[in-house]
Amino acid sequence: MSIQLRRRSRLLIPRRLSSRRTIRRTSLERSSGAFATDVSLNTEGANSFTLVATDAATNSSTTTVTITRDTIAPTVVVASPAKSSVVGTVPVVVSGTFSDATAVRITVDGVAATASGTAWQASISGLGEGPHVFAVEATDAAGNITDLQHDVTIDLNPPIVTIVSPVSPALTKEATLTITGTAVDVSLVSVKANAIVGTLEADANTYEKKFTITGVPLTEGDNTLHVIATDAISRTTDKTILVTRDSTLPVVSVVGPDQVTRSHAAHLVVTATDNLAVKDVAFFLFNAPTTAVVGDTLSLTITATDTAGNIASINKSIRFVAEGALTGQVLLDVNGRPIAGAHVVMTGSETKDTVTDARGHYAFPVNDQNVVMTIDTTINGLPTTTIERVVAIQSGAGTVPVDARLTPMGQS
């Protein structure tokens, strides 16, 4: 006969006897055919006792009682899934081994496991994504209990990748690119583009991380970049973006006059071309015409910017010149000889005066389209007639009015 004992070191054995019996030479008294005694279980595991019953005629019979003492809790090992690992499917089969002196019952999260020899397993369903701790409990026949906490992470989906910058298709003049975005996954490991691994930063949302990938090289022309997010069980999500690199500068040319007057505009023809597209053309003029004086050089800078941000510029110098020149000669009316020292006044947007030279000549730079000329003098103490004329100026050219002839006043 075999008896299993739950955690106690002593056992009361009841038995009916028709005669006197002994347990290990301990004499037992019977009462109405029954006997009882306490025995000490000094050994962990099986403890055997021999019972000998002897009647008055010295006839005897023998029986052996085996009692198992079990005070040690079961040893339980969880072999799969590995502790702190990431699990990618449900239901999750939790399995392992056990050892104990007596029969063992194992549960996982309250679900009874099946056992075969010393191996056991339990299938756990209904698990959502995220951390989970399996509660493993092993109870032997003596009531000894072993509890285990076995943590894993449930990850059922591949990463979700959103690229924030650049927006595909993108255009840049730079040789390298920075890519930013977010990736959502329970067990995200890395985000990379063209083998360059980005940095990850926690975001406000659960399981969402911001990523930044810097220094992604670009070749001239179109570049198809693969942004790949990988989780702990090697599932990947591949997002592609198209980035065109254009480092070629626009070509700018300008055709137009090298001189300009105050009232006559200079018409310039600017041509800007690009291998892709020109975004804008800008003009920057230094020494504005409203403040320029004759002889100043105006500096004009023309810049062309293409859609990739490349900028090309060209400079053109334009000289600020007078509207024209006014020249003439003052003669004595009586004999046609030139008059030196005659007083000549030109009135327009400004008033200028001069005297004629020894040949009777005078000259003015002119910034007006029309001026008034006034000429007079004194000869031998006698004043001459005064000539006043309105003269039209030919822009950019010399205007020579009809010779002015003066007659001395009072001359007969």
Image (tube, rainbow, N blue to C red):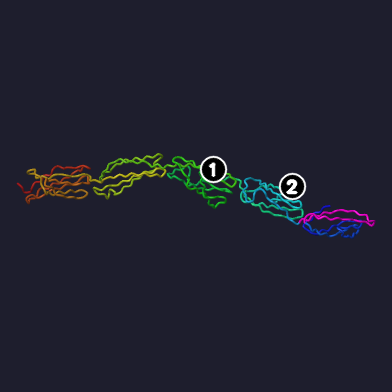
Percent from the top left, x then y, of residue 31? 90, 59
Circle 1 packing at 10 Å, graded few (<14), some (14-19), many (20+), is some
- Which residue is situated farthest in the right direction here? 57
Circle 2 packing at 10 Å, graded few (<14), some (14-19), many (20+), is few
325 vs 82, left or right, is left
Percent from the top left, x then y, of residue 192? 52, 46
Percent from the top left, x then y, of residue 187? 58, 49
Name the one closer to the observer, 394 or 206: 206
Name the one closer to the observer, 57 or 384: 57
Magenta part, dominant SS? strand
- Look at 54% across and 43% down and name the residue there: 238
Mark-to-mark CA distance, 1 and 2: 46 Å
Q: In this rendering, which labeled residue sits more in front, label 1 or label 2? A: 2
Percent from the top left, x then y, of residue 18? 92, 56
Seen in the picture, residue 408 relative to 12 is either above or below; the reply is: above
Location of mark 2 (residue): 117
2 vs 321, left or right, is right
Q: Secondary structure at mark 2?
A: loop
Res. 238 mark: 1
Q: Is residue 137 magenta?
A: no
Earlier in the chain: of badge 1 and badge 2, it is 2
Residue 67 figure quarter: bottom right
383 vs 217, left or right, is left
Residue span colored magenta: 44-70
Seen in the picture, residue 47 relative to 361 is either above or below; the reply is: below
Q: Which amino acid, by three-letter code, is at mark 2?
A: Gly
Q: Is residue 59 magenta?
A: yes
124 vs 196, left or right, is right
Res. 96 mark: none
Q: Which amino acid, by three-letter code, is at mark 1?
A: Asp
